[in-house]
Amino acid sequence: MYIIHVASECAPVAKVGGLADVVSGLAWEHSIRGNDVEIILPKYDCMRYDQVWGLTNSYNDLWVPWFGGAVHCSVWFGEVHGRKCYFIDPHSNDNFFNRGTFYGCRDDVMRYAFFCKAALEFILKSGKQPDIIHCHDWQAGLLPVMLAEIYQHHGLWRQRVCYTIHNFKHQGIFGHDILAATGLGRPEHFFSPTQLRDDHNPSVLNCMKGGVVYSNFVTTVSPKHAWEARHSNQSHGLGGTLHVHQGKFGGVLNGVDYNAWNPELDGFLPARYGINNVDDKYKNKDALRDRFWLYKSEKPIISYIGRLDEQKGLDLICHAAHYALAHGAQFILLGSASNHAIHNQFAHLRNQLGQSVDCHIELGFNEELSHLIYAGSDMVIVPSVFEPCGLTQLIALRYGTVPIVRSVGGLADTVFDKDYSDVDLGMRNGFTFNDLNNAGLESAMSRAISLYYDYKEVFRHIMLNGMKADYSWNHPGAHYMNIYEMIKHK
Ligand code: ADP
Ligand code: GLC
């Protein structure tokens, strides 16, 4: 099958969070199964050019219709660890992708509306006839809309769209200007509640709703979150639309790319290890302590790695740092915030705790360092308010690092409490809590720390259970193939 992913991120070349890992992991899984897989991305000035091989100008004369005129684009081709990637490079005064940042611009919706239009124009003009276009998150939500409303009439009528929602929190809200820019026009049509009109604010349109309404199949990234999106407020207002389209909506649990995340092969680690030599993990713990000048003692290291966003339970992350230090553990944080107030909150925490020989707070994005922290830590915490899937706990499991998580979304589907889960003992792989407050978090952290000190052998079983579990792309890759097959024949 011929599959094209259209997304705003792909690891490791353009990565903000888990979306990047998923695009890259799923594309690889499908290509090793013998499919033809390509990825279309914006050509950002701030992407990691050192991760692209053989970047060449592959299509020079792409004119993308825009606001009654046209924007000239070049399309570049390069390989990202074997994945075939096309990068859209518009030449206009808007400088859509030369902003020194991936997101956070006032005209983000305009930027990605342009990206969708350019991706379709490129597919059409280069004569590509993919079977499936797999679109991700709000940034690609307008693609299926433009495909059905414009491009199918120009020759792209065979293509079917699978749309994956990684995060309902950001939906891409817009108005008349984008209808005019993209050539969709017809406000009277698109402002209908069955089309793109936002379910809660009738004066605006919604990219993600467009993705849901116009795609052939819609997924989110875990079964539990699919349920939450339908039956609780976790769809951030899209529940009604999902209800209407329930027949083509489901949850597929993400996988992890075990080529990139495998402690037996990981080139970023001073000591590689697996189930048979798990003690070598502790050489990484030593190296991690050396790197941050942490005291070498019997204490466990508890870490947080992730975006610093309200979604992740910010107050609980701060509380976890204080609680760990007060209860015989060391604490490491690697996180980046796109919001200044949140950055300052954690800069303050760093000032408060940074002098401690048991704590290190690193603010920023650092892929290489994250590998060492996953490997060198004993536990990670993921106290999210909501979590569509979560990859940090899945990566941690592979590295024998015991997750302590709030039981929501994909965290609930993948972490099974050592004491309270109803799965077999051999599958229990971490600690979970339900209540979104300090007491909830402490109930799990205290049990994890006590087990580490008092029942080392049992703690080791929990680690090994996690390392043995298969959260590769094997199962989800097959699941997505079934979805593609199903919609291809519709
Ligand atoms: P989300 O997509 O909501 O950010 P996930 O758990 O799905 O959360 O994925 C997060 C991914 O981003 C993981 O691969 C994690 O290791 C990585 N990551 C997040 N923040 C950082 C950071 N500051 N430095 C390095 N890697 C990070
Ligand atoms: C999102 C979610 C996260 C998920 C990731 C990849 O950003 O917040 O839970 O794992 O996308 O699907």
Image (cartoon, rainbow, N blue to C red):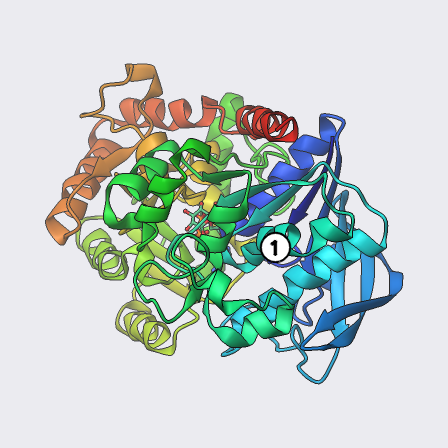
Residue 144, position in %: x, y?
A: 59, 50
> Could you tell me how many numbered marks the image carries?
1
Which residue ends up furthest to the left in the rendered image? 439
Q: Quadrant of the C terminus?
A: top right
Q: Residue at x 68, y 31 (%)?
A: 30
Viewer-nearest residue: 9 or 306:
9
Q: Whole-percent x and y of residue 182?
A: 63, 68
384 to the left or right of 142: left
In the rendered image, the vertical position of residue 39 relative to residue 461, given as above or below = below
> Residue 355, percent across and down?
31, 70
Return the residue found at the far front: 188
Whether residue 310 sits left or right of residue 59 in the image: it is left
- Quarter of the image for residue 457 reads top left
Name the residue rendered at 56%, 35% in the picture: 263
Residue 266 visible within the image: no
Quarter location, residue 349 = bottom left
Q: Residues within 10 Å of mark 1 (few under 14, many from 20)?
A: many
**Left or right relative to 32: residue 249:** left
Residue plotted at (60% across, 30% down):
487
Instruction: Quarter of the image for the N terminus: give it.
Output: top right
Q: Which residue is mark 1?
A: 143
433, above or below 463, in the image? below
- Residue 112 seen from this side: yes
Query: Amino acid type of disc 1?
Result: Leu
Image-quadrant location for residue 63: bottom right
Q: What's the residue at 28%, 68% (across, down)?
A: 353
Q: Is residue 77 above or below residue 46?
A: above
Disc 1 residue: CB within 8 Å of ligand 2 = no
The answer to which of 251 and 466 lies nearer the viewer is 251
Image-based side of 288 in relation to 45, left or right = left
